Structure formats: C-alpha cells, structure tokens
Amino acid sequence: MKKTFREEIIDDIFKFSGEKNAFELIENKYRSINKKTLTEELIQVGIMPEVFDHDSSEEKLWSKFSDLILSKSLGYLGLPSEVLRTRGNSADVYSKAKEYTLVSDAKCFRLSRTAKNQKDFKVKALDDWRREDTYALLVSPLSQYPADQSQIYPQAFSQNVTLLSYLHLQFLIKKGVSGNLEDLWKLPVYIKKNYKLEDQKRGYTYWHAVDTVVCKITGQTIEILKKYKQQEIEKTREVGQEGINYWISKIEEFKKLSREQAVKLLIKAQKIEQKIETIKKAIEKAFVEKL
C-alpha cells in the first residue's frame, strides 16, 4: 500500500534526525512541495506525531518542518519567506513584502497533551522578537488554541500579534489570495472599530474578527469557511486515530514484557537513575562551595 504524505514525512524525519544537517535534508526534499499537496496536507502539520518521543530530535525536526511549511504557505500568499537558522530570541520565519515585514512562528501540539496555556504560545515573545519588523504572526491548529478567557487574546490584541490557524492559511491559499493581507496583520484596528469595549479582548471576539476579515479578503461567505472548519475536524479525527493506534500497540508491546524488562522500563521512564546522579552532583557541589 502506498504511504500517505504524513507517513512519508514521519519516515524521513526518523531517517534524517540523527544527521548534523537534518533540517537541510528535510528542506531540500520538501522545499518544492506544490500548492495542491500543501493545501491538502496543511491542517495536519500542526499535529505532532505520537510516535516521536517527547523532546527528541525527531520532535524538534518536525517543528522545523512545520516552519518550512509555514514559509511555503506564506510564499503562496504572495509573501516571499524564509526559515531563519538563528536559535533563541528569534522568530522562526521571516517574510518581506513591498510595504512591510512579518515575523512568524508555527506551533505543533500532540493531541494527547492536556490543556494548553498562554506560555505555550509565546505571544509576548513574538512581540519581542519582532524588533524593527512591522508585524508578527503565530499559527497553530485552530482546535488547540485556548478557550475564550485565555490571556493570549488580550496579549495578541494589545501587542498586535496576529493569531491564525493552519485552516485559515489553507482557506486563503485555496481561494487564490496573493499579497492583500495587511488587514489581517492589523486585527486590533478592526476589533476596536467593530466590537464593544468589554468584548474586545475575548477569544470569541478575536476568532469572529479573524473569520470576518479572512472572508472579506477572499470574497467568500462565513458559511463556506465553516465547511472548511468541518474538514479540520475530520482531519483531526483521522490523525487522532493514528495516535490511538500507536498507543494501543504500545500497550500490547508492554504486555509481552517480562517482569525484569518491565521494571527496567519503568526505572528509565521515571528517570530515576538520572535523578540520583543529579542529587549526587548537587551534594558534591554544595560541599565544594563551602570548603
């Protein structure tokens, strides 16, 4: 059976993650991804595969892959973009239009992870990273953004950081938008003009404004956009089943372990040996500093 696009990427990330130039290898293979494939697969890019260990080189490479896809998406919207190679204190994607510049960050989440909070989205950090650049953008799966009262919405409103979803990017690309995006980067201006003061920093208001502006830019109706949102639900359900199948297979694998193997695995999972070593080093350091 032919592999899906997602399966192919997962295999490549396992293959390349151990290489020093892992991102270059991924970039070289997927930099020419065409518009049709990108729009078909865009929504699932923000869902981290469960098969990758937490904080592993594979997980980090998938995050860099999502930056590449965000850069390509913005390019298809008429914003020439590149993935930045600098580490720390910097956005991941840089775009330059005729009248302005844009810094962007792509977020990926595991469906198995519990509730997200404002620290996961780094809205304030994006504003800091902007420096002299005109606008800032954060992209995440729509379903993973926090509920109505989260602090990320007042932050996005007051610091003029645009929150978008992969679904909105897909919608904009499919409807042939190119270059006419500045209204999206000025959402607070639109919100101030069209919503009551007491509602301006709510999540519900923010997403209503995003949907309205996206429909205005594309010339489409809210009803058509809602149909696209249904596609995200279906894609999330599909990718979610991938994760469920993976964890079910792990349960079956664990059931076959001997008692000794299970104990060793539990010790490793709890990082007990590393904790013992950390305590020993802390004791030694304390005595050295006191002598």
Image (cartoon, rainbow, N blue to C red):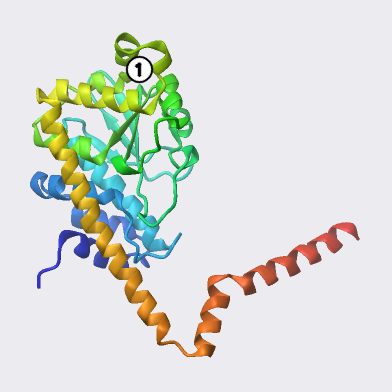
Residue tagged by mark 1?
188
Image point (14%, 44%), residue name: 39
Instruction: Find residue 87 and report its horizontal and vertical position in percent.
Output: 45, 45
**SS at mark 1 in the image:** helix
Nearer to the camera, 15 or 120: 120
Would you say residue 15 is visible in this rendering?
Answer: no
Tell me the quarter of the picture where residue 178 sits. Answer: top left
Whether 121 is drawn above or below 101: the answer is below
Outermost residue toward the top in this view:
193
Image side of residue 291 versus residue 249, left or right: right
Image point (35%, 57%), residue name: 61
- The amino acid at mark 1 is Pro
Whether 179 is drawn above or below 62: the answer is above
Instruction: Find residue 122 and report its horizontal and vertical position in percent.
Output: 46, 37
Image point (39%, 17%), residue name: 200
Tell me the quarter of the picture where residue 201 sits. Answer: top left
Whether 1 is drawn above or below 37: the answer is below
Image quarter hosting the N terminus: bottom left
Image side of residue 97 versus residue 51, left or right: left
Q: Residues within 10 Å of mark 1 (few under 14, many from 20)?
A: many
Instruction: Find residue 63 and report its horizontal and vertical position in percent.
Output: 35, 51
Nearer to the camera, 149 or 76: 149
Instruction: Find residue 244 and report its horizontal and vertical position in percent.
Output: 31, 65
